């Protein structure tokens, strides 16, 4: 097919970082954490997820041991899957984004 020039490649790490960090849902997870704990996490929280070519994220999880299975993990894992990323050609890709408030 000659339409290959219109197919987009998978989003860059930089683009994914911006979309995740600027998402209000992700920020609300940190606000809830601060309300419960008195302050934001002292370290960057690393969130890993798989991005389907449709632009839909799946299988979000927090990598930091101290936040695993906490409300912050549950919230961020859920919120990252609701972000609409650009669709792209090719197979699923895994990204890790560090978020610090």
Image (cartoon, helix red, strand yellow):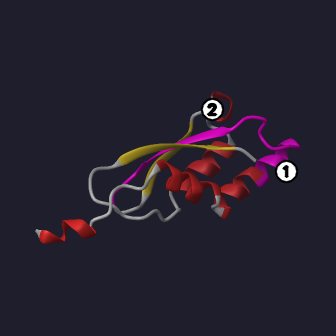
Q: Indicate whether residue 51 is drawn in magenta.
A: yes
Farthest residue toward the left?
1
Name the residue that disc number 2 marks: 64
- Residue nearest the observer in this picture, 17 or 47: 17
- Name the mark on residue 55: none
- Residue nearest the observer in this picture, 100 or 8: 8
**Up-down: is 3 above or below 79?**
below
Q: Indicate whether residue 94 is drawn in magenta.
A: no
- Residue nearest the observer in this picture, 30 or 22: 22
Name the residue that disc number 1 marks: 35
Q: Look at 86% across and 43% down and name the residue there.
A: 39
For residue 54, what is the image quadrant? bottom left
- Between marks 1 and 2, how big is the CA–CA gap? 20 Å
Image-based side of 76 in relation to 40, left or right: left
Q: Sequence order check: which comes first, mark 1 or mark 2?
A: 1
Binning the other alpha carbons within 10 Å of mark 2 as few (below 14), some (14 to 19) or many (20 upward) gives few
Highlighted range, magenta:
31-53
**Residue 84 % position (x, y):** 48, 65
**Up-down: is 23 above or below 77?**
below
Q: Secondary structure at mark 2?
A: loop
């Amino acid at each position: 097919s000659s339409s290959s020039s219109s197919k987009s490649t998978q989003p860059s790490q930089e683009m994914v970082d911006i979309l995740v960090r600027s998402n209000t849902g992700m920020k609300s997870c940190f606000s809830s954490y601060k309300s419960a704990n008195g302050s934001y996490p002292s370290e960057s929280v690393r969130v890993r997820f798989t991005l389907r070519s449709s632009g839909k994220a799946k299988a979000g999880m927090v990598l930091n041991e101290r936040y695993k299975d906490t409300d912050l993990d549950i919230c961020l894992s859920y919120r990252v899957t609701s972000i609409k990323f650009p669709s792209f050609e090719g197979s699923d890709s895994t990204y890790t984004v560090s978020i610090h408030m």
